[in-house]
Image: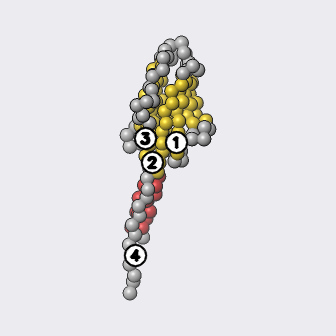
Amino acid sequence: MKTLAKYFSVAALVALSFISNANTDTNTPNKASNFAIGVYQTQKTLKMNLLLEKVVGKKVIIYLKDEKGNLLHTEVVAKATPSYKGQFDMSELVDGTYTFEITDGNETLVKQVKLQSKEVETSRKMTFNK
C-alpha cells in the first residue's frame, strides 16, 4: 500500500509540473525608443521575471493576458521610476499561451510564454495471489 501511495505521489507531482518557455524569437524586439525589457524564467520554477529600464518621465504599463486576450494582471510603472523588476508566479495557470504586453502608449513590446504540462508515464505491476 505504501508503494502505491509513493507512485501516486510521484505521478501527481509530475502531472502538476509544467514547462514554460519564453519566446526567444530573434525577430521580436526587446527595445523600444523609451524603454527596454528582458523576460526570463527562474530555473526549475514557474516564475517569470520581467526587467524593465525606461526613460524617466514616461509611464509604462505591463499587461499579462491569456490566449483569449483576457486581462489577468496589470502593473503600472510610474513616470518617476527608472527601472522595474517583477516576478510573475505562473504555477496556478492552466496550459496555454500567455502574453506580456509592455507599452508606453506609443510603442508596445510583446513577449509570449507557453505553459505545457509534461506527459505522465505510469508503470504498474500486477501480481496474482495463488
Q: Earlier in the sequence, mark 2 or mark 4?
A: 2
Front residue of 62 and 23: 23
Q: Residues within 10 Å of mark 2 (few under 14, many from 20)?
A: many
Q: Are marks 2 and 4 in contact (CB under 8 Å)?
A: no
Q: Which residue is mark 1?
A: 97
How many other residues sit within 10 Å of disc 4, few (<14), some (14-19) or many (≥20)? few
Q: Mark 1, mark 4: which one is toward the viewer? A: 1
Does residue 2 appear anywhere in the picture?
A: no
Query: Which residue corresponds to the image point at 39% horizontal and 66% vertical from the top-left?
Result: 123
Give the residue pinned by disc 2. Answer: 18
What secondary structure is marked by label 1? strand
Q: Which circle marks residue 107 in the picture?
A: none
The residue singled out by tag 4 in the image is 126
Q: Residues within 10 Å of mark 1 (few under 14, many from 20)?
A: some
Q: Is 52 situated above or below 129?
A: above
Residue at x 54% of width, y 12% of height: 57
Helix or strand or loop: what does disc 2 sit on?
strand
Q: Residue at x 53, y 39 (%)?
A: 98
Find residue 79 and report its horizontal and vertical position in percent. 55, 16
The quadrant in which the N terminus is found is bottom left
Alpha-carbon span between mark 2 and mark 4: 30 Å
Q: Amino acid at mark 1?
A: Thr
Q: CA distance from mark 3 to mark 2?
A: 10 Å
Q: Amino acid at mark 4?
A: Met
Q: CA distance from mark 1 to mark 4?
A: 40 Å
Quarter-of-image position of residue 45: top left
SS of the residue under disc 4: loop
Quadrant of the rendered structure where residue 67 is? Answer: top right
Quickly name the residue at label 3: 21
Distance in Å between CA atoms under marks 2 and 1: 13 Å
Camera-nearest label, 2 or 1 = 1
